[in-house]
């Protein structure tokens, strides 16, 4: 099967991104043809600094490699280096209902967050995402729960195009991570963990041990004493249990038993230790890769070449069907 997914270069990669997306990518690359993109064009829809963009792109390539994405098995590339993404976006714009775009949860949330910079790109974001996915005749899109609605819209756009102009695009399926599809904010556990929130609310994949300990110990919980999974009544503790389970491989039931007579502080201390040791390999590999910038840039260059071959053929077919060539 062909797999496509991407992450924006701006902001830090947090453990929500890791558990919701990257972690599944590493598994999927073993048996599938995988294409993983650094979606820099998507990042332009939120406030960003042009001076730091290239560094952030390189850092995300390092995140992919440090997480275990193998460039021998998977294609890794930067979205803006394959111009077919923007060209197909325009074609797909013409079959996408505006009403579908305005009802997207991400658009509603981000248009509140970025009131002062409400650009059309934020509204059209899912169309660019549809182009990303459809260019590669993707079978499966592994994402966190927050992106599920966008993949659903991608399916609608593919069907609409195919019906109107003839069969061009494969209609992709979404794949959510078994655990960790929705990791919540450490400070406001009713909201998803988000890289555009304040740093105390997320745990970066490369955070240093002291930062990890501090953020976990300060994570917002309820006033109760029982360590029990109940996302509605105890969203904070439930989120921490999800993290514990994802990084230890133990089930939530086992963990509830293990911490039955323990207080929140002891549970948090144990979770912080687990996270410090689980994230250590990521910090180590990042340091190694930072010293090998030329190698990482070469992976991106080769990745873009390989991706473009597939993208070009789909775009040509779409243009032909629309009467453009
Ligand atoms: N909290 C989360 N839990 C599980 N998965 C998550 N993802 C994001 N947040 C969580 C998944 O990470 C992948 C990359 O997402 P992105 O770079 O497109 O960013 P995003 O979805 O907009 O979420 P972020 O990273 O937190 O950024 P902002 O602050 O912009 O909302 C996707 O597969 C996503 O599902």
Image (spheres, grey):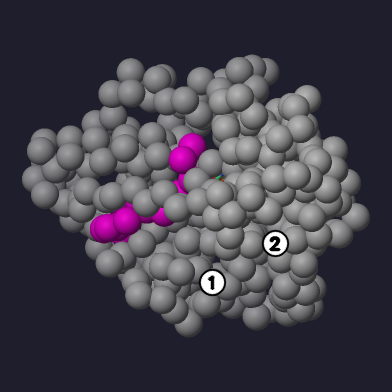
Residue pictured at 79% horizontal, 55% vertical: 270
Q: Is residue 66 visible?
A: yes
Q: Which mark is residue 310?
A: none
Q: Quadrant of ligand 1?
A: top right
Residue pictured at 54% horizontal, 41% vertical: 182
Residue pictured at 46% horizontal, 69% vertical: 27
Q: Residues within 10 Å of mark 1 (few under 14, many from 20)?
A: many
* Residue occupied by mark 2: 59
Residue 325 relative to residue 130: left or right: left
Q: Is residue 297 above or below residue 155?
A: below
Q: Position of residue 80 (x, y in %)?
A: 51, 54
- Residue most extreme to the front: 261
Q: Nearer the viewer, residue 295 or 194?
A: 194
Q: Quadrant of residue 98?
A: top left
| Number of numbered discs on residues | 2
| 307 drawn magenta | no
Q: Is residue 156 above or below residue 143?
A: above
Measure the alpha-carbon separation of dots 2 and 1.
Answer: 14 Å
Q: Position of residue 64 (x, y in %)?
A: 59, 66
The secondary element bearing badge 2 is classed as helix
Q: Nearer the viewer, residue 184 or 31?
A: 184
Task: Choose mark 2 or mark 1, whichever is in front.
Answer: 1
Quadrant in the picture for the N terminus: bottom left
Residue pictured at 75% horizontal, 27% vertical: 224
Q: Is residue 196 visible?
A: no
Q: Position of residue 78 (x, y in %)?
A: 53, 60
The secondary element bearing badge 1 is classed as loop
Q: Earlier in the sequence, mark 2 or mark 1?
A: 2
| 136 drawn magenta | yes
* Residue occupied by mark 1: 69
* Range covered by the magenta-colored residues: 133-146
């Amino acid at each position: 099967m062909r797999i496509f997914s991407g992450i924006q270069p701006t902001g830090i990669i947090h453990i929500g991104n890791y558990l919701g997306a990257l972690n599944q990518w590493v598994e999927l690359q073993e048996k599938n043809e995988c294409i993983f993109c650094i979606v820099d064009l998507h990042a332009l829809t939120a406030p960003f600094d042009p001076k730091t963009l290239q560094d952030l792109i390189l850092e995300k390539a390092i995140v992919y490699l440090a997480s275990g994405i193998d460039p021998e098995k998977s294609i890794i590339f930067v979205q803006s280096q394959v111009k077919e993404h923007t060209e197909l976006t325009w074609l797909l714009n013409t079959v996408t209902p505006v009403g579908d775009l305005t009802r997207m949860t991400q658009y509603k949330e981000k248009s509140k967050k970025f009131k002062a910079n409400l650009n059309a790109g934020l509204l059209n974001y899912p169309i660019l995402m549809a182009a990303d996915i459809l260019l590669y005749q993707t079978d499966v899109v592994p994402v966190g729960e927050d992106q599920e609605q966008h993949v659903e819209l991608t399916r609608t756009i593919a069907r609409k195009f195919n019906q109107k102009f003839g069969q061009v695009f494969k209609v992709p399926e979404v794949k959510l991570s078994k655990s960790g599809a929705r990791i919540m904010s450490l400070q406001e556990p009713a909201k998803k963990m988000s890289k555009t929130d304040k740093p105390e609310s997320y745990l970066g994949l490369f955070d240093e041990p002291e930062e990890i300990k501090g953020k976990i110990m300060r994570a917002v919980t309820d006033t109760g004493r029982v360590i029990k999974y109940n996302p509605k009544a105890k969203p904070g503790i439930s989120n921490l249990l999800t993290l514990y389970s994802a990084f230890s491989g133990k089930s939530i039931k086992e963990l509830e038993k293990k911490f039955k007579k323990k207080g929140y502080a002891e549970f948090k201390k144990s979770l912080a230790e687990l996270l410090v040791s689980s994230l250590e390999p990521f910090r180590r590999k990042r340091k190694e890769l930072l010293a090998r910038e030329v190698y990482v840039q070469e992976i991106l260059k080769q990745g873009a070449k390989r991706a473009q071959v597939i993208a070009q053929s789909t775009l040509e077919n779409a243009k032909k069907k629309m009467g453009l060539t």
